[in-house]
Structures are given as C-alpha cells and as structure tokens.
Image: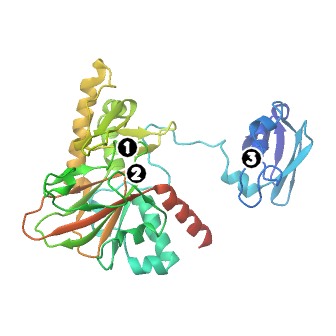
Amino acid sequence: MPDSLIEAEGRVLRVNGQRFHAVWLRDNALDAATRDPNNGQRLITLADIPPDVTLSAADITGNSVAVTFAPEGKTVSFPLTWLKDHAYDTPQERSKGHMPPQTTPWGAGLQSAVPTAPLGALKAYEATRFSWLDAIRSYGFAKVTEMEGREGELFEIVDLFGYVRETNYGRHFEVRTEVNPVNLAYTGLGLQAHTDNPYRDPQPTLQVLACLENSAEGGENMVVDGFACALRLKEEDPEGFAALTDHSARFAYTGSAGVELHARRPMIELLPEGTLQAVRFNARSAAPITDVPFEAMETYYRAYRRFCELVDSAEMEVSFKLAKGEAFIVDNTRVLHARKGYSGTGTRWLQGCYADKDGLLSTLAALEASL
C-alpha cells in the first residue's frame, strides 16, 4: 500500500513520494460542492477557502486518498492516478527555449513524410481525423487532398475542428494576382517564409489555403518550422536568442482604407517557464524596432539576420506545389509559409481563411478521450 504522510504541521500531504500543499488540494477538490459534476467548473473562489487551511487527517483506501481539511472539517477523496497526473513536485524543463509538449521540431527531412489525409476520410472517420489533428499539433502543419476544388470548400476543413476567424479581409480571402493589390500576397512575386498577420493582437493561430486552380509555372508553397529555427539560433548564438526573446518587435498594417493595425510582441515568444510559445516573423509587416535598448540593438540585429538566414535555408524547408483540390493548414504561431514567384502564364488561384487553435486542440482532446 502506498505511503501517505501529513507534513509541515498539516500544510503538506506526501503521497507516493509526491508532495501537495493543503491549499492546493482544497482549491482543486473534486467534490460536487466544489466543482460542478457535469462541466467540471469551480463553484467556489479562493476567497471561500480559509486562509489557514490545513490537513487534519489523510487515509489511503484502495486507489484513492481521503483527506480532511481543517478548520472546515470537510473530507474529500482524490484518485491516486489523478494526483499523479497533476503532480507539480517533479523536475520540470525550465530552460529558455524548449519545445512544447507533444511537438516535434523538423526540417527538410520531413519532405518525404508530409502529414496528409483526404477530405472525405477526415469527415467520415474519427481515427483519421484524430491522426491528422495530432500531426498538426506535433508538426504545425498538414495537407488535405481529394477535395472538389470548388469555391468555399476550405470552410469544410475548418468545420472538422472549429470556426472561421473573420478579419478585415473578410471570412475568407482570394490569393491571386490583382491590380494595385492591398497585400503583396495578391501578386505573382515570391514571398519569404512568414507568419500571417503579426500586426494583430491576438494573432490568428491557424491558416488554411486551398487550391482552386494552379496552371502557372512556379508558385510552389514552402513551410518552415519557426521553432526549429529558434532552437538552431539558441544553439549557435545564445546571446542573440535572448535578445529576440527579451525584447518586443513591432508590426503594422495600413494597406486598406480605415484599417490601422499595430502589434508589439517578441519575434520569438516564450512562456515564463521557458517554453517556446510563438514566432512572429514577417518582413513585409515589420515596423521600426524601438523597444530594444541602444546597447543591445546591434546584438538584436545580428540575431535577427541569422534567424532570417535560417528561415531562408533550404535545409529548414519543406516544399510542395498544390494542385486543384488540395489544401494545407499551418499553425500560424509556429510554422512560417512561403511562396515561390510564378509567371504570368497560366492561372493560380487559392482561397484562404483563418481559424484558431483552441478549437483544434479541443477537438483533438475530445477525440483522444473517445478513441
């Protein structure tokens, strides 16, 4: 039988080598008076918990531990597996610039293994949809094939997991050559790998691009793992990596009448625990950098230049040319996408839209639980 011990004058419970504070246990109590049994939401606030809460008793029976809180005299049971899954008295990765859980950095070696699924199978089979969504979580992008190639079909991809994020470009946008375009994406020019809309806060976290026609010469799509580039920069130039994470870049867009979009975020964003959270990289939308101290500006630009070189490097990219009826989705907080220039002969027509990652991760978690 696992051992249990109340320590620190009732302020700590030790179970199977893991320690839990009494206030944490009370705050996370699983009883129906603390959490709604249907939706799991808390029914109390921290102010409802006595500030001097301690443990007066603890007893392990079977696969649960029952604890009694003083001064309330309230007894609550915790499954041992639940405590193990939520333990915080364990070594955790806290180095600046490490990959998030369940993600895998990649480079050109992924060219032969691009995660792909037919739209029909994604609609029909939960297991297929789960594997495809899991690949997006892991790699930050995936392709869709066997579509009809009709207008608006890209919304059916978003319907697999969530909702369209509407912007000033509309519910969706057309990507084809225009006269006097409001965005360089609407020309035949090549585009450097970039994240979309860094000038928004919050930034759209997913982007879908679906191909309706593509007979033009050139115009291949490329994707680059921004997190993998950040890891390379950290390895080569820790000081430069710190400059890009510790100081904000600025982004702006004023290409349409009545639109003035500005955002201020680091080019490489970390969580307080050091986890890579987001990359924002878009030379077309970069505004003057004014948040870097004078004495750090040269270091910042040295790192910025090297990060740019890594983004442009063939060893970091995966490329493909979309055919009619194909699409791809990218995690816009991590994976940069690019386009090679294309000629004036033939036609290239894509439709794009934005969505958000919370819906995708929610659907993935629900499928993971059901499967």
Which residue is drawn at the image coordinates 25% and 56% (left, top)?
Answer: 317
Residue 351 rendering spot, x and y as whole percentages: 28, 65
Look at the numbered disc 2 and give the secondary structure of its residue.
loop
Type of the residue with mark 2:
Pro
Contact flag, marks 1 and 2 (Cβ < 8 Å): yes
Q: Quadrant of residue 40?
A: bottom right
Look at the numbered disc 3 and give the secondary structure of its residue.
loop
Q: Which residue is mark 2?
A: 204
Horizontal side of 220 relative to 7 (left or right) equals: left
Contact flag, marks 3 and 1 (Cβ < 8 Å): no
Type of the residue with mark 1:
Arg
Q: Which residue is mark 1?
A: 200
Relative to 369, is 47 above or below?
above
- Please report whichever mark, 2 or 3, sits nearer to the chain's N-terminal start: 3
Q: CA distance from mark 1 to mark 2?
A: 8 Å
Residue 75 rendering spot, x and y as whole percentages: 89, 48
